Each structure stands twice: as C-alpha cells, then as structure tokens.
Image (cartoon, grey):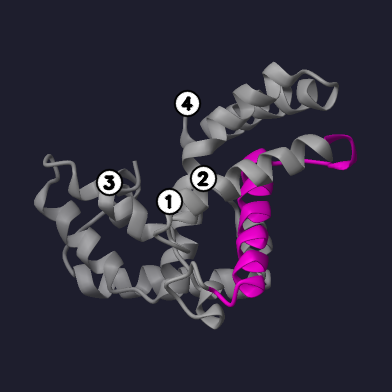
Amino acid sequence: MNKRQRIAEENTILLNLWQQAQAGDSLAFCQLADKQYRTLFNYACNFTTDKEFIKDSIQELLIHIWEKRQNINIQFVTIYFLKALRNQLLQEFRRNNASHSLLDIDEIGQLSDYQTIETEIEQNELYSENQVKVRAALNELPRRQKEAVFLKYFEGMDNEQIADLMQVNRQSVANLLFKAITSLKTQMHTVSHLLVLIIPLFW
C-alpha cells in the first residue's frame, strides 16, 4: 500500500467515526479526538510554548466541534481539524495581543510544523548521513516553504488542500514546493532520490 492509499484509508476510518459522532455517538467522537490529538498538539506547539494553553485550546476546539457537529460538513478530517485549530489560535492571539505567542502576528501565517518534527528527529539516533544532511537542508528553508513541504510529504495533502490550509492560491503552493525542492537539490548536490530521504524524516 502506497502512502496516498494509506492516507485515504485513514481518512475513511476518521470519516466513519465522524459520521457516528454526528449521529450523537460520543464514544466515536472521543475515539476521533484521540486519533487527532497528537497532530493538533504538535501543530499548536509552533504557535506557542505554553502547553497548558495548547491543551485548553484543543479542549475548547473539540467541545465546539462536538456542539456544532450537525452543522459541520467534513470531507478530510485532519485538514478540517488543523484548519479549525489554526483559526482558533489566531483569534485567541489577537484577542490577547499575542500574549501566548512567541512570534509576531504577521509571522503566524508562515508557521511550519517542522520544528516540532525536528525535535522528534533528534530523539532518533538511527539516521543515516544523508538523512542528517537533508534535515539540515530542510532547516535552511524559509518558513512557508518548510510548511508546504511538511503538509505535502508528512500529511500527504495535495496542492489544493495545502492552499486552503495556508490561505494562499494553488499556484503559490506549487511555487513554494518548487523553490523548496530546487533549493534542497542545490544544497544536497549528489544525494539521489531526495524525496525518498525527506519522507522518513517526518515519521
């Protein structure tokens, strides 16, 4: 099973839980929330280091989604949850003058999940020399390019989905990915099968 098939299969499972939740099955919603929690938490860690604030925000989001479930139409579960959390955090930062955020409000739209993923990478001592080089090269990319690469190769999103989440047009996503891969190839020089090396770094 390739990655695209696996992601589609996972989304089918999540959608099934969501449909049960919409019908009033609170246990199914708890299972869905449990499957999404780590992704949501890791994503929010790029906006703030206040872990209690993150937990509260996710809890607030989940309660809101549960309460409004009958009026919510979801096609891709993970994308919907990530986008909803991103919007909620932005609103909260603006209400509180970004008191929880380490970044300026103008920079939030350029956030990447890569720093959180990089922390996980550093905990794994089994990286090959080429993977270490790719990781270093990824770290040199601008924030928006890293975000696009993460969403493309970690979350498995297509360009249209990435554009929706990052609030840019599809061509901008294509440009970001092209620039990112071109930059990585330039930095890596002789490393072949670049994308094969990138993907394991995110797992």
The reply to whether dot 2 and dot 4 touch (C-beta < 8 Å) is no
Mark 1 or 4 closer to N-term? 4
Mark 1 or 3 closer to N-term? 1
Which amino acid, mark 4? Met
The reply to whether dot 1 and dot 2 touch (C-beta < 8 Å) is yes
Q: Residue at x 42, y 72 (%)?
A: 102
Q: What's the magenta bit mostly, secondary-structure-wise? A: helix
Question: Which residue is labeled 4 in the image?
Answer: 1
Task: State the SS at label 4.
Answer: loop
The reply to whether dot 1 and dot 3 touch (C-beta < 8 Å) is no
Discs 1/3, front: 1
Question: In the rendered view, does 25 fall on the left or right side of 201?
Answer: right
What segment is highlighted magenta in the picture?
69-98
Q: Closer to the camera, 30 or 94?
A: 94
Discs 1/4, front: 1
Residue 55 numbered tag: 2
Q: Residue at x 67, y 69 (%)?
A: 167
Give the answer, above or below, for where 66 lies relative to 194.
above
Give the answer, above or below, for where 11 lies relative to 177.
above
- CA–CA distance between discs 1 and 2? 6 Å
Question: x, y (%) of residue 130?
Answer: 15, 54
* Residue 81 magenta-highlighted: yes
Number of other residues with Cα within 10 Å of mark 4, as a class: few under 14, some 14 to 19, many 20 or more: few
Question: Which residue is labeled 3 in the image?
Answer: 120
Question: Which residue is labeled 1 in the image?
Answer: 51
Discs 3/4, front: 3
Question: x, y (%) of residue 144?
Answer: 47, 72
Give the answer, above or below, for where 202 lies relative to 15.
below
Mark 2 or 4 closer to N-term? 4
Task: State the SS at label 2.
Answer: helix
